[in-house]
Image (cartoon, coloured by chain):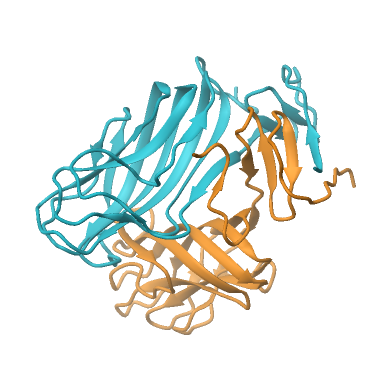
Chain colours: A cyan, B orange
Amino acid sequence: MSSIVLTADTLLGTPTIGSVEFDGKAFYNTAQGTQRGVIPGAQFFRLESNLAGANVATVQSVFGVSVTLSTSTIYAFEAMYYFNKTAGTTSHTLGIGYGGSATINSILWNSVGIDGSATLPTRSTPGLAANAAVTNQTITGATASAAATTFANIKGMVSINGGTFTPQYTLSAAPGGAYSTMANSYFLIYPIGASGANISVGAWA
Amino acid sequence: MSQIVLTSDPLSTTTAGALEYDGVALYATPTAAQRGVIMAEQIILLQAAYTLTSQTAAQKLFNTPTGGQVTLTAGTYEFECFYSLSAMSATSGSFGFALGGTATFTQFFWSLAQKGAAAVATATATQSTYNVAANTTLATASVNTVGYANISGIINVSVTGTVIPQVSLGIAAAAAVGIGSYFRIRPIGNTTVTSVGNWS
């Protein structure tokens, strides 16, 4: 296997141009001046084909998987969810949140999204939701349409203690037909430093 | 040129502190098992406004370098694009976004766009779309001559070739793409990649 393995140690007191460093939490490089930057090594999950969910009003996994993360670490994450269903006329809303075995020190995330009855809404006024907790946050209006679509573009930051982290969604009522998470929905997450203090990477002063 | 060159070969068991290369992407593993893809970005951006050709058909968004295109090998890529437009026609129309080029690919992108104000700096409601093909109306047609769009998504390239970020105009005009407009794209993995890292 062709690879370079760096031993984790304390970052250089003064960043050195051209250096690549590793402190056990994240990788860093310094291209100019003292502008050390974190190298975003993203753990990535992308759906190759549609994933059928369940026709329930309880929490369920967006992708059917969880990612196992480290203790005392801050992660940044981004995601794109595309949900679609074609059956069931019981009025409901759709919300998103996070689960898993990890202990969450803190989290802040937002979602900009659209929802409608068409397969892919066009030129809809987006809705914005934000949350400082992992708990479910409703991101749609109520719909009783058999054909329903929700799309969410998500960014966030989480301080975590080791364990699994699971992107989830919850329906306010069982619609009568399950949603699927559609192909090419994805989630990426990467470490940016140790928890418990401000993260300051680079020439901040 | 100071550099480190890794020979590509298959990924194997993860090692904390490792930097790896499999011929598709570079990877970093900060903690045991948590291999992550290094998001090495290819970027094109405008340091000066670029005046478009007066036409409605899709055309390149960028001219630095001249072709405004990036050559991509087969694989899966994540991308983001932001652009502003001015000097569009005062006749009611919209504008759009497309990906052109010689590569064979599928695309999935989300757009947040605005053409509802007389100035781009004016706070006003945006509109969203989700697309798997070119969209010529990212925002409702209006007589305003300015607008902008922020787009992000996935491209799955099956046959190597060029990819050209493009804009279309609802009404032909010599509109200008604004300074600071950019397109960035980064590899995730091969054409069938579904996960990188400690997912289960």
Q: Is residue B159 left or right of residue B51?
A: right
Say if A105 sits above or below B173 in the image.
above
Residue A126 picture quarter? bottom left
Q: Position of residue A27 (x, y in %)?
A: 68, 31
> Residue at 53% across / 45% down in the picture?
A44
Say if B53 sits above or below A164 in the image.
below
- Looking at this rendering, what residue extends furthest in the top direction? A196
On-image quarter of the N terminus of chain A: top right
> Residue at 49% across / 39% down in the picture?
B200
Say if B65 sits above or below B38 in the image.
below
Q: Position of residue A200 (x, y in %)?
A: 58, 24
Q: Is residue B37 left or right of residue A60?
A: right
Residue B4 picture quarter? top right
Q: Is residue B137 left or right of residue A161?
A: left
Residue B119 picture quarter? bottom left
Q: Position of residue A53 (x, y in %)?
A: 29, 51
The answer to whether any part of residue B22 appears in the image is yes
Say if B177 sits above or below A94 in the image.
below
On-image quarter of the C terminus of chain A: top right
Q: Nearer the viewer, residue B63 or A118?
A: A118
